[in-house]
Image (cartoon, rainbow, N blue to C red):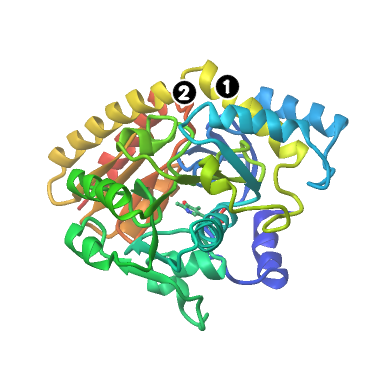
Amino acid sequence: MDDKTLEYRTGKYLCPNYARYPLAVQTASGCRLRDFSGREYVDLLAGISVCNLGHSHPEIVEAICSQARKLIHTSNLFFQEEQVLLAEKLVATCNLDRVFFCNSGAEANEAAIKITRRYMHHVQGQNRHEIICFDGSFHGRTLATMTATGQDKIKEGFAPLPQGFRHVPLNDLRALQEAVNNNTAAIMVECIQGEGGIRLLSPEFKAGIKKLQQNNGVLLIVDEVQTGLGRTGTMWAHGEDGLHPDMFTSSKALAAGLPMGALVVSEDISRAFGPGSHGTTFGGGGLPSAAAIKSLEIIQRDNLVHYSRETGEWAMQRFQEIRDKCPGTIREIRGRGLMLGIDLQCPGKEVWSALLEMGFVLNLTQETVLRLLPPLIIPRQDLEDFAQALEQVLSQY
Ligand SMILES: *Cc1c(COP(=O)(O)O)cnc(C)c1O
């Protein structure tokens, strides 16, 4: 199939819910994507922060193939070795104790919402059910996680929505304090908003969240679906932000390209999910678990967390130089580690499109923010090549 036929047949046979980029990737390896004509692109998006070890990492391919030969799936009716090994590895990276595995970020956040409500009802015996979320956030597309999401356009036409969510402006501590009351069960937050345009939490806001958690018995749910696993220069973003979540969620990069999500939670709260209370057929299956175990091993062995931090700092400085050289084009550069946003003052779509033409794949979010989520193995030279292309494009404005 050539890519024109592919575009036509996509329109004919698939639901039209995705606005696709004018690119069809036929093969990929490392930090390179190849289209149907054999043209190469530098991948600065990694399948939206999924392929953090680059494409077709030989050790991941090997882990998947050998697990596939051994055992692909049995179900959670049985004990499963691979999911236990992975859970042990995950809890060793943080201060929490128990894991629930699922298949996506939305499902992990859905589990966080459900366990919060059930914990308040069943364990605490309190009628606290409200979850406070933030404007600009993104937590997924199920009915509950979409309701938690702080972007109206995502909810259009899907009413009636589940109850029990309240939104306040990000970094508005007074609004947050005023929103907390006797019904508040939890605060749900991304350490850095991804879809929302790489927006960070202010130091006062983080301190305020901590206080509400300590003094008001409010649980803290951190959505690390995009920020986790080294993306922001630490294994989890919440550590760097000084937050101590009662639970956090992971997905995207977790199983190195296979679908997997996880809720990581304290032992106390985990008891709210008694036998039969929640579940999913595929969650924590042998195949994605094996890929995730290998992926964590590689991230740790190859110091990719440290590499992400240093490379991100270097890239931010480099983009800052471009900002100075091309005044009036870049409003702000935000991010941490290899989660970077370049907030443009000139037409975002045009710049993004020109960069794609020049062979750089990245994402445009919130209309003005170029979002970079490159594989954590990205060579500096690729980012330098991107920086030069960006400068060339911006110098025309
Ligand atoms: C992508 C994302 C989700 C949703 O994950 P899916 O796997 O698409 O359901 C939730 N939260 C954040 C922060 C994300 O970036």
Q: Residues within 10 Å of mark 2 (few under 14, many from 20)?
A: many
In the rendered structure, the answer to whether residue 160 lies left or right of residue 79 reads left
Residue 41: image location, x then y, percent = 51, 39
Residue 36 in view of the camera: no
Q: Secondary structure at mark 2?
A: helix
The amino acid beneath tag 2 is Leu
What residue do we see at 72% from left, 53% from top? 275
Residue 261: image location, x then y, percent = 60, 47
Q: Quadrant of residue 260?
A: top right
Residue position for label 1:
298
The amino acid beneath tag 1 is Ile
* Residue extending farthest top: 301
Q: Are marks 1 and 2 in contact (CB under 8 Å)?
A: yes
Residue 8: image location, x then y, percent = 67, 67
What residue do we see at 51% from left, 75% from top? 162
Judging depth in this view, the residue of 305 and 78 nearest the camera is 78
Judging depth in this view, the residue of 64 and 382 nearest the camera is 64
In the rendered structure, the answer to whether residue 93 lies left or right of residue 189 reads right
What residue do we see at 39% from left, 73% from top? 152
Can you say which quadrant of the picture contains the N terminus? bottom right
| Residue 304 numbered mark, or none | 2
Q: Secondary structure at mark 1?
A: helix
In the rendered structure, the answer to whether residue 225 lies left or right of residue 384 reads right
In the rendered structure, the answer to whether residue 224 lies left or right of residue 317 reads right
Residue 191 in view of the camera: yes
